[in-house]
Image: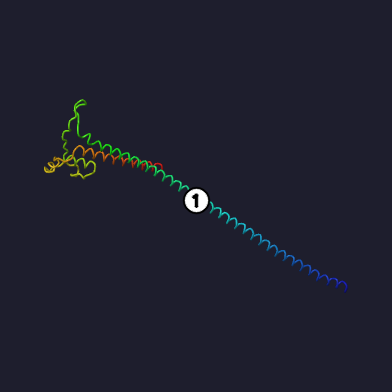
Amino acid sequence: MNSAFSSAWFKVPFVAGLLMLALWAFLTALHDAHDIGYALAEAKGQAVLEQLRTEHANAEAARALQVAADAKAAANALREQTQRADQAAARLADQQRQYRQNTDRLTGEIARVNDLYRAALNAPPEPLPPCVFTRGFVRVWDEATGAAMPAHSGGAAATSADAGAADQLDAGIGRADLLRHHIRYAEQCRTTAAQLDALIDVLEDH
């Protein structure tokens, strides 16, 4: 009886020790599992964060490259447009020189074509007869070119006897003056037309 009791008493601490050992092993495993899980989660989080950083850096690099490409394209377009404008300006300047040379040449011929005339090809040259231009002629001429404002609103004819008489007076200009004015005015018209054509060419190329 005592021997059986002693054997049972000996087994109780042993079993308790085994239970404590098992509990300690379980808690240790649980703690290790927690540490492992935390480490895995942290590593995964770091990997995701690093991936986001990489994607962000790649996106920023792509945007920077696009901005640089756009800037380069804009610079090239501006350079090409500037070159076209310079070329148009050079052509225009050349045309203006030609127009001025033509004006100088024609101006030099004014005296020659206003001194003598022939009634026929085989007739002898004779002095040109007088040519009178009235003040009214000059007024109408200037109003047509915009060099003077209309004397009468609405295009109504002059009704004043004084105004009509003044229009019939000699303006004091001759054929040479009229031709000289026409040559210079023609140069201005051709220059303006050339400037407009050059501007249209630049805008159309753009």
Q: Find residue 172 and report its horizontal and vertical position in percent.
A: 16, 41
Label 1 Cα neighbours within 10 Å, binned few <14 / some 14-19 / many ≥20: few
Residue reaching furthest to the top: 122
Rendered view: 59 above or below 4: above
Rendered view: 196 above or below 18: above
Residue at 18%, 38% (x, y): give it: 174
Q: Nearer the viewer, residue 84 or 17?
A: 84
> What colouring style does the render use?
rainbow
- The quadrant of the picture occupied by the N terminus is bottom right
Residue reaching furthest to the left: 161
Quarter holding residue 150: top left
Q: Secondary structure at mark 1?
A: helix
Q: Nearer the viewer, residue 32 or 74?
A: 74
The amino acid type found where label 1 is placed reads Ala
Residue at 83%, 71% (x, y): give it: 10
Q: Find residue 196 and report its horizontal and vertical position in percent.
A: 33, 42
Q: Is residue 40 left or right of residue 93?
A: right
Residue at 19%, 27% (x, y): give it: 124
**Residue, disc 1:** 68
Q: Find residue 131 and report its horizontal and vertical position in percent.
A: 16, 36
The number of callouts visible is 1
Q: Is residue 189 left or right of residue 74?
A: left
Q: Find residue 201 and report its horizontal and vertical position in percent.
A: 38, 41
Q: Is residue 41 left or right of residue 14?
A: left
Rendered view: 40 above or below 200: below
Quarter holding residue 99: top left
Q: Nearer the viewer, residue 155 or 95?
A: 95
Quarter holding residue 188: top left
- The quadrant of the picture occupied by the C terminus is top left
